[in-house]
């Protein structure tokens, strides 16, 4: 893998999946190889976005240590803004498609619609509420634990995409981002990224005085649950799509935050 190809994948990941300001020259069309490399950059990118979203959390708690709930709301809102809400949109579309109980072809058509149905609204409300409640409990009165928790959760959620892009996982459609990256991430690469993210969770847990064993266990449990969601959606819809990738990110991230809250 060349350095220029790596840079191309990183640039695509930043331009497609974040609201970070980048030079106009970074924008360009994605081919299959570049898109697969962009997916491999997503866990690191997620850690950066999560850490940035943790800045307002730390600022609020530094000013008012008892304002954990307000800090959590600002942290989750910041992460949504930094990722342009793309993964939440995918979660809502996937929930509407699955909740319709329609045949696969019709469910995929529902997923592609621009509006959000009742299943999508309910799912967004539940997931965001869980995110905020769990993060508020995790941070307590610790100034920097929120930064660490958001970085770990965002990185873990994006690892779930690399698992969904293993060879053998089909695309539900012949076009779109899901078709572009389906089967494009080698299993050893995805496993290596998983180990790095779990190890990073342990290191950050030590840094903020949390459980260095409990945090990686929470991450691993979240990824297993996301894998179960992926298996169900691929069986139900015939493969993965970009919206399903987004749903996996949000499910794994929320479950990681819940696990971190329970781990202490």
Image (spheres, rainbow, N blue to C red):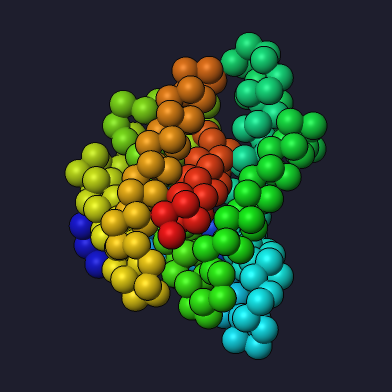
* Residue 189 pos. (x, y %): 23, 48
> Foreground: 252 or 64?
64
> Foreground: 8 or 190?
190
Name the quadrant containing residue 63: bottom right
Q: Residue at x 25, y 41 (%)?
A: 186
Say if 170 sits above or below 220 in the image: above
Count of numbered circles on the image: 0
* Residue 56 pos. (x, y %): 62, 78
Query: Is any part of residue 249 visible from this angle?
Result: no
Q: Residue at x 31, y 26 (%)?
A: 168
Q: Residue at x 64, y 58 (%)?
A: 132
Q: Is residue 1 left or right of residue 127?
A: left
> Foreground: 221 or 43?
221
* Residue 16 pos. (x, y %): 54, 57
Query: Is any part of residue 102 visible from this angle?
Result: yes
> Foreground: 62 or 116?
62
Q: Is residue 114 left or right of residue 256?
A: right
């Amino acid at each position: 893998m060349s350095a220029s190809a790596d840079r191309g994948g990183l640039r695509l990941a930043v331009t497609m999946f974040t609201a970070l300001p980048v030079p106009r020259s970074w924008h360009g069309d994605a081919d299959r190889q570049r898109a697969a490399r962009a997916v491999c950059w997503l866990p690191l990118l997620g850690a950066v976005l999560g850490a940035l979203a943790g800045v307002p959390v730390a600022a609020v708690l530094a000013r008012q240590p008892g304002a954990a709930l307000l800090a959590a709301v600002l942290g989750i809102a910041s992460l949504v803004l930094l990722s342009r809400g793309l993964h939440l949109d995918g979660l809502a579309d996937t929930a509407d498609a699955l909740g319709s109980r329609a045949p696969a072809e019709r469910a995929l058509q529902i997923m592609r619609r621009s509006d959000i149905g009742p299943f999508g609204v309910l799912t967004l409300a539940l997931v965001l509420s869980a995110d905020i409640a769990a993060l508020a409990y995790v941070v307590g009165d610790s100034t920097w634990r929120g930064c660490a928790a958001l970085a770990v959760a965002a990185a873990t959620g994006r690892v779930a995409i690399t698992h969904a892009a293993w060879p053998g996982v089909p695309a539900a459609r012949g076009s779109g981002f899901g078709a572009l990256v389906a089967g494009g991430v080698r299993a050893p690469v995805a496993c290596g990224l998983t180990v790095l993210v779990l190890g990073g969770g342990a290191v950050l847990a030590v840094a903020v005085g949390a459980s260095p064993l409990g945090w990686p266990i929470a991450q691993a449990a979240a990824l297993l649950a996301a894998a179960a969601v992926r298996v169900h959606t691929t069986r139900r819809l015939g493969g993965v799509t970009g919206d399903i990738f987004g749903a996996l990110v949000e499910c794994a991230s929320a479950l990681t935050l819940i696990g971190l809250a329970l781990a202490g």
